[in-house]
Image (tube, helix red, strand yellow):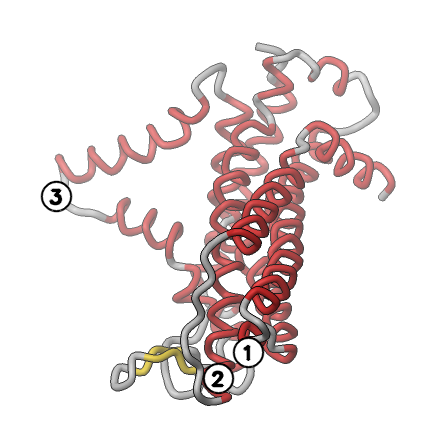
């Protein structure tokens, strides 16, 4: 257990961007709240206040999620490549730490630690920005703070971290496999083989199974993990063009559908196999 904690600490020491990127991005949003133009819509009813507050929190979460996704992708591609390139792998291999523990620690950081840090930063930034906007608008920004919605958002963030870690495990496994194998141009090697498979299938078979599979894995998480639009879920009312909220976040998330989906566990199995291959490559490959 202590070894795993030290491995995770090592990732923080060697990759300060894990916390620095969310901190800098949050600071930029705070500066925008302090000095940017503040124009809030007219909110006539408590339901309008609630909807606007929810949209505010979701917007902050999505912004941090997007930034976190880009960095996590780069982190995975660099995770097993960098120490081979700078030859620090020779030092780490001299320690009584298995390659399996090293790879799994890096995977845990990418799929759990980085999203958790990003969502903590999103929470703190949203709270501070709501406070600043409320003061600048002479109290009219009070709709941005809805305590019950904030608590429900925490449930949604935790659910998102867990489901995304499972759903994107094959993507993470592929990126780590490339990172453990490639001698250079890891970004190119990460998308060149899937692209080649897609082109070959389209040209010679005239089908699009590879494209659909990749698209589903990269963009299909909301369709599996969340409930579709409806009266009990978050949806936009076509008649009034307004966002309507469920009475509880548990009407929005769909854990039973996600955890019972064959797609979830087939993808997890593929991801586990790719991670196992990355570990084997890590054992056999040394410095570049």
**Disc 2 from disc 1: Cα separation:** 7 Å
The reply to whether callout 2 and callout 1 are in contact (CB within 8 Å) is yes
Q: Is residue 250 visible?
A: yes
Residue 84 lies, in percent from the top left, at 61, 16
Residue 180 lies, in percent from the top left, at 55, 25
**Disc 2 from disc 3: Cα separation:** 43 Å
Q: Residue at x 52, y 59 (%)?
A: 60
- Position of residue 24 relative to residue 145, above or below, is above
Observer-side mark, 1 or 3, equals 1
Residue 272 lies, in percent from the top left, at 56, 45
The reply to whether callout 2 and callout 3 are in contact (CB within 8 Å) is no
**Nearer to us in this view, 90 or 49:** 49
**Disc 1 from disc 3: Cα separation:** 43 Å
Query: Pointer 2: residues within 10 angstroms few (<14), some, or many (20+)?
Result: some
Q: Which mark is residue 15?
A: none
Q: Quadrant of the C terminus?
A: top right
Q: Residue at x 60, y 42 (%)?
A: 110
Q: Residue at x 20, y 33 (%)?
A: 200
Q: Write down the quadrant of residue 33 in the picture.
A: bottom right
- SS under mark 2: loop
Q: Write down the quadrant of residue 140 in the picture.
A: bottom right
- Position of residue 73 relative to residue 94, above or below, is below
- SS under mark 1: helix
Q: Which mark is residue 206?
A: 3
Q: Which mark is residue 246?
A: 2
Q: Quadrant of the N terminus?
A: top right
Residue 218 lies, in percent from the top left, at 39, 50
Q: Which mark is residue 249?
A: 1
């Amino acid at each position: 257990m202590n070894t795993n904690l030290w491995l995770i600490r090592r990732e923080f020491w060697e990759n300060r961007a894990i916390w620095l990127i969310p901190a800098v991005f949050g600071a930029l949003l705070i500066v925008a709240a302090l000095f940017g133009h503040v124009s809030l819509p007219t909110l006539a009813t408590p339901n309008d206040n609630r909807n606007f507050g929810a949209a505010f929190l979701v917007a902050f979460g999505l912004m941090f999620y997007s930034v976190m996704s880009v960095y996590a992708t780069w982190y995975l591609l660099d995770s097993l490549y960098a120490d081979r390139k700078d030859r620090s792998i020779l030092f780490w291999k001299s320690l009584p730490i298995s390659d399996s523990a090293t790879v799994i620690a890096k995977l845990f950081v990418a799929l759990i630690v980085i999203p958790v840090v990003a969502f903590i930063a999103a929470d703190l930034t949203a709270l501070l920005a709501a406070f600043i906007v409320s003061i600048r608008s002479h109290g009219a920004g009070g709709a941005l703070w809805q305590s019950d919605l904030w608590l429900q958002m925490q449930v949604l963030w935790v659910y998102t971290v867990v489901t995304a870690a499972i759903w994107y495990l094959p993507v993470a496994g592929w990126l780590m496999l490339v990172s453990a194998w490639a001698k250079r141009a890891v970004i190119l090697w990460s998308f060149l083989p899937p692209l080649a498979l897609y082109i070959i299938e389209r040209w010679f078979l005239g089908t699009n199974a590879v494209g659909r599979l990749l698209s589903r894995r990269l963009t299909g998480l909301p369709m599996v993990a969340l409930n579709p639009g409806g009266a009990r879920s978050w949806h936009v009312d076509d008649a009034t063009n307004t966002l309507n909220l469920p009475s509880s976040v548990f009407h929005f998330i769909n854990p039973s559908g996600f955890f019972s989906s064959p797609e979830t566990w087939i993808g997890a199995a593929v991801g586990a196999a790719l991670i196992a291959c990355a570990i084997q490559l890590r054992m056999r490959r040394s410095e570049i």
